[in-house]
Amino acid sequence: MQWRAFVLGLVLLRLGLHGVLWIVFGLGPSMGFYQRFPLSFGFQRLRGPDGPESPASGPAGRPGTPGGPSGPSWLQPQVPGAAAGRRRAPRRPGPDVCGPGHWGYVLGGRGRGRDEYEKRYSGAFPPQLRAQMRDLARGMFVFGYDNYMAHAFPEDELNPIHCRGRGPDRGDPSNLNINDVLGNYSLTLVDALDTLAIMGNSSEFQKAVKLVINTVSFDKDSTVQVFEATIRVLGSLLSAHRIITDSKQPFGDMTIKDYDNELLHMAHDLAVRLLPAFENTRTGIPYPRVNLKTGVPPDSNNETCTAGAGSLLVEFGILSRLLGDSTFEWVARRAVKALWNLRSNDTGLLGNVVNIQTGHWVGKQSGLGAGLDSFYEYLLKSYILFGEKEDLEMFNAVYKSIQNYLRRGREACNEGEGDPPLYVNVNMFSGQLMNTWIDSLQAFFPGLQVLIGDVEDAICLHAFYYAIWKRYGALPERYNWQLQAPDVLFYPLRPELVESTYLLYQATKNPFYLHVGMDILQSLEKYTKVKCGYATLHHVIDKSKEDRMESFFLSETCKYLYLLFDEENPVHKSGTRYMFTTEGHIVSVDAHLRESPWKEFFSEEGGRDPVGKSGHRPRPHELKVINSSSNCNRVPDERRYSLPLKSVYMRQIDQMVGLI
């Protein structure tokens, strides 16, 4: 009888314990002998967001674990066809990837809980710290700009280690890494003009504009890439011209005494010198390079990348609408349509390299990075600026194809099991995986997703790139997500992650992105600052450097960092709606840019004929300036969000650093 009394006592004790737990914690009774408490008593557990509990028993998906999955779902072929173009069944966690159970196990080992992460990432970002970071971003720009002016101007770029200038490589015309960009036209000064205005430095802006007007000429024996000359030089001249002629002057007094539209005339001169690239091509897709004095070189390559040929419409369209001359928009739009008509009938995807004479895809890789990135970007931004419905239709179609064939991982960012979302490189015709790397240029894509309102997906994709940044203090040019190591190790001060961080902060107002910006600022100061500026990282692991500071560091990287922390900037407070070009040049979105008196010239028939051989080609009009700062109606899909970042997502960011 004693053992029966003992057992009965244990049962009564257990029931009493459950009764106390019911009253105190609201936990229901269970007769199981392995009751799992959602509380942590010396070990960590992680509940997936709005999902079931995950065991704290260890990383079951690691290689060598019996019964574990054979590989990450990123390697699995995509199954298209969901109604929204992206919905699919959740995937199981693979080895070394971030299923909820894996997060709980490893984070439990670190002893970090929900409160610490919420405090760290979502807590208030003090105004004093914000002002300090704003001033640091401004100081970064000033240090680079002043050293360029002191040691490099009038050459194109600054060599910040040896404190001297860099121009085109005349001795080696095949050095395209240099010669595609540098045209012997004071590139860094031109590219930085609107950054000076955005930072409110009216005196230096006015001085710089006068220097450009008085010293820069495009009558040069320089062979440059059409794309780079368009986005860096043409775009900056147009942006600065509109800042000068804006009647509201939101950035302070940026007017130039006796200004007679010189920057617009210079932009027109440069564009005319780029026009030969569009001639004598059977498809209407332009040659990749032109000589500014003599036109297309006799030995010119007939192959070009999709982004280079199809990302000219914003700058060329603005120029056409300011001049009242349809020629520039017409040739750029014809190139876009030609590329669009070459997309795969099965997948709707485009490749990354095409022959401009035959229309044959030389490069069949379809992805979000080099060779394709700004093509997608400019389909949407052309619609925002010009309101042409066909641009939006093309963008929506290709975005659906991207979701169907490039996106891997679980369906939602913050819910479900499986790998976090990732966009891979596939064959444009079959959708099959081509390689296991991504490049740093892809970090622009979360920012583009913000513009269309796909903020949830943008949040999760941004986390992947930020995790890599935190691991190395920079983004390697290529990162192999299967090997979890860089493939190409240099970082040339690119702005794409900063741009997406800025746009996500504007969309969510979550201070997490201020912390991201602070991390990036501190990394740049620690690893890239040298005697006379900021240097390219040759190797993101050992932090060795190359003696080059590309112009986009001042025109984009510093600009987006500054705007991230400058909440009171006229960009955010003036009431004018702004858009940034792919080179970060600011353009006000107004009704006059949506006026297109030559729409009939953009017919499908006229778009197929070579320049100079079509009766549909419009004749240039006399130079006619439209000076306006009036606002257009609210552009569709430009929405503001106040989405909280869930604690599990914040944890995943830090955990990815451990996995990568």
Image: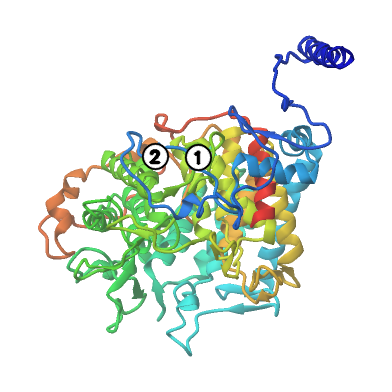
Q: Nearer the viewer, residue 391 or 52?
A: 52
Instruction: Please state the horizontal and vertical placement of residue 71, each as a whole percent of the image.
Output: 51, 55
| Residue 630, above or below 556 | above
Q: Quadrant of residue 545?
A: bottom right
- The residue shown at (47%, 36%) is 454
Instruction: Please state the horizontal and vertical placement of residue 645, each as a whole percent of the image.
Output: 63, 34
- The residue shown at (54%, 79%) is 167
Q: Nearer the viewer, mark 1 or mark 2?
A: 2
Farthest left residue? 615
Q: Is residue 321 visible?
A: yes
Residue linked to disc 1: 457
Label annotation for residue 86 = 2
Task: Residue type at mark 2: give it.
Answer: Arg
| Residue 345, above or below 293 | above
Crowding at mark 2 (Cα within 10 Å: few <14, some 14-19, many 20+): many
Task: Residue type at mark 1: give it.
Answer: Asp
Label annotation for residue 19 = none
Crowding at mark 1 (Cα within 10 Å: few <14, some 14-19, many 20+): some
Determine the CA span between mark 1 and mark 2.
Answer: 10 Å
Q: Nearer the viewer, residue 638 or 112?
A: 112
Left or right of 658? Residue 354 is left
> Tag count in the figure?
2
Q: Nearer the viewer, residue 631 or 484?
A: 484
Farthest right residue? 2
Give the structural element (helix, strand or loop) at label 2. loop
| Residue 27, above or below 454 | above
Quarter that holds the C terminus: bottom right
